[in-house]
Amino acid sequence: MATVELRFSASPEHVRTARLVAAAVARRAGVDESVLDELRLAVGEACSRAVGLHAVHGLTTPVRVELTEAEKSFSIEVGDDAPSSVPAPRDQSAAEAAEDTDELGLAVISGLVDDVEVVSDAHGGRIRMSWPIATASVV
Amino acid sequence: MDLSLSTRTVGDRTVVEVGGEIDVYTAPKLREQLVELVNDGNHHLVVDMERVDFLDSTGLGVLVGGLKRVRAQEGSLRLVCNQERILKIFRITGLTKVFPIHESVDEAIAATD
């Protein structure tokens, strides 16, 4: 089971809440302070993308965010209900890609997160990201 | 924090000072502002991002949209940013090659291509 699970209506105004919650749980789990900014950005990108996909497909279901603390890692999974949403890679310039914020969002995520997996099937898509947890010193 | 926007004119340049968070929720406000400025004949824009706390790909998309609009009028769009965490987003998306990025507003205003 996830340590903290969040479901929010697929509207842009709630993405900030998801970012704040993810960063707070990650900090508590022991994720290094220096990567919290990147984590916040990556989860925001994943949620923005999910919100966009729900809008495009006219879905009224919520976006799901699962924050899971394990022994050595902290993982975040963002789930949407849009069918087969993984875009085919295309050869295009950065400026062209920037017009398509969906692809730019994925580019930001893969640029920021070493351990990332994007999967999609007929029922929806998931972006799974994880970060190492700094070994806590005994106090 | 929400998005704050203010504009001022220096010679033929229009400086747009942006503060707060530019994300999927607030980016449309920035887009509106840029579109309005260009429609009103301001074709040389300097976007000062020194007070931006957060920027995501939606924000990048809006800036690219702004750049295309001013270029269509033979104008320019320059960014001012010294914050490493914001600059990093431009770097990983390859957009440092697309935007002129300056260290200060004065430098951006003085710059010519």
Image: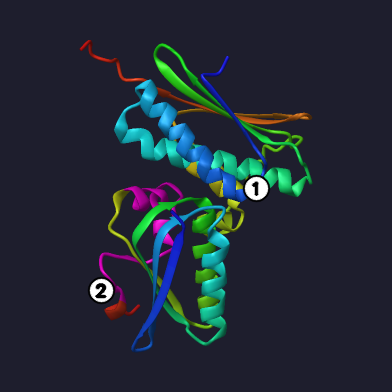
Q: Is residue A57 above or below residue B100?
A: above
Q: Is residue A99 above or below residue B108?
A: above
Magenta stretch contains residue B93: yes
* Span colored in magenta: B85-108
- Colour theme: rainbow
Q: Which chain does tag 1 point to?
A: A
Tell me if A99 is positioned left or right of B20 in this view.
right
**Numbered disc 2: secondary structure:** helix
Majority secondary structure of the magenta segment?
helix
Q: Position of residue A104 (x, y in %)?
A: 55, 49
Q: Residue furthest left?
A: A139
Residue A32 image point, x, y percent: 31, 28
Q: Residue at horizontal 45%, vertical 14%? A: A70
User: Which residue carries the number 2 mark?
Assistant: B107
Whether labels 1 and 2 share one chain: no
Label 1 sits on a secondary structure element that is: loop
Q: Quadrant of the C terminus of chain B?
A: bottom left
Kindly identify which chain the residue marked by label 2 belongs to. B
